[in-house]
Amino acid sequence: MDAAGLDSDGREFKTPEDMWREQAGDPSKKTQWYRDGVSYWEGVKANMDGVLGGFANVNEPDITCSEDFLNILFSERFHAADARHQPLVVLDCGSGIGRVTKNLLIRYFNEVDLLEPVSHFLETARETLALGCQTNSDMHKAVNFYCVPLQDFTPDTARYDVIWIQWCIGHLTDEDFVSFFKRAKVGLKPGGFFVLKENIARSGFVLDNEDRSVTRSDLYFKELFSRCGLHVYKSKDQKGFPEELFAVKMYALTTDPPKKAPRAKSKTSTNRPRTIM
Ligand SMILES: C[S@@+](CC[C@H](N)C(=O)[O-])C[C@H]1O[C@@H](n2cnc3c(N)ncnc32)[C@H](O)[C@@H]1O
């Protein structure tokens, strides 16, 4: 990656490598980077407004758009017959207070594990899911609550149909991003996949000096996916968010390359006016 980036105070970095060297380039800086990230969230209230940075109103469009995406993925990759034989299991990474689990995942999966390094968030998730969640039953339940950061986590072999990672991967350095996904692949069942839902920078990256996270561009993510040996099976843009927020994208990532559809002959020339991407 050679695209330049900015920090939240407008300071420019020529490359991500320059930024990472400065922020987390030796073991003590890296320890501090992760400590600051978790400390930031430890000071945030365990409620919807807290985990959504003051934008609790995005919860509804977020869940709706994720559900549409998940439905497409389910219909293409899982078959009803498979689900009868074994429970569908998902891991909610950087789960916060269990917002995504409660509003979405627990309705689709028989077992949900939650991973969250901030203990007061995880405790809130545990309480909410134990008490108030109507869908929490013997058929659909939260099972394991891991109070661990992503960079230190290795899943059990072949436990998960889906590993859901939303609004937390920006806390990981590039190096830990790649090693997390490489380790986490073993946690997927055959045919399983990752869903990564994240803010997207227009180009390069934006470093947030306050919560110690990095917002990457689509190109930056794609370069990291290729370093992880992952393929973009499908992606979808989030709709309906306030304009002042970053764009948000969902990626379904698989370890197997997507099957190539036979090439249809096009009558139109590719050399035609197009909208600018
Ligand atoms: C913006 S909140 C999103 C929470 C949840 N995914 C949601 O969408 O409601 C970011 C979450 O990332 C968690 N987080 C911070 N550093 C992390 C790390 N190194 N590994 C995993 N999660 C982390 C925070 O504690 C916080 O719960």
Image (cartoon, rainbow, N blue to C red):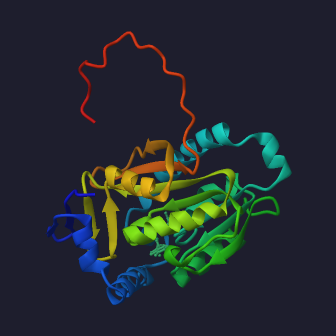
Q: Residue at x 64, y 63 (%)?
A: 186
Q: Nearer the viewer, residue 63 or 257?
A: 257
Residue 168 visible? The answer is no
The N terminus sits in image quarter: bottom left
Residue 48 spot, x, y in % from top left: 48, 67
Q: Depth check: 57 or 162 in front?
A: 162
Residue at x-position 58% and y-position 78%: 122
Q: Residue at x 55, y 43 (%)?
A: 257
From the top left corner, tell me how far across and down residue 254 is, in percent.
Answer: 56, 49
Residue at the limit of the structure toward the top, as seen here: 267
Relative to 70, residue 177 above or below: below
Residue 262 shows up from this direction: yes
Q: Residue furthest left?
A: 11
274 or 174: nearer the viewer: 174
Quadrant of the image for the C terminus? top left
**From the viewer's perspective, is 16 left or right of 70?**
left
Observer-nearest residue: 222 or 208? 222
Q: Position of residue 95 (x, y in %)?
A: 55, 69
Where residue 137 sits, quadrant-wise, is bottom right
Instruction: Please tell me in which quadrant of the rendered image residue 82 appears.
Output: top right
* Residue 107, position as x, y percentages in the image: 69, 54
Would you place residue 270 above or below residue 215 in this image? Answer: above
Q: Is residue 85 left or right of residue 6?
A: right
Relative side of 173 to 135, left or right: left
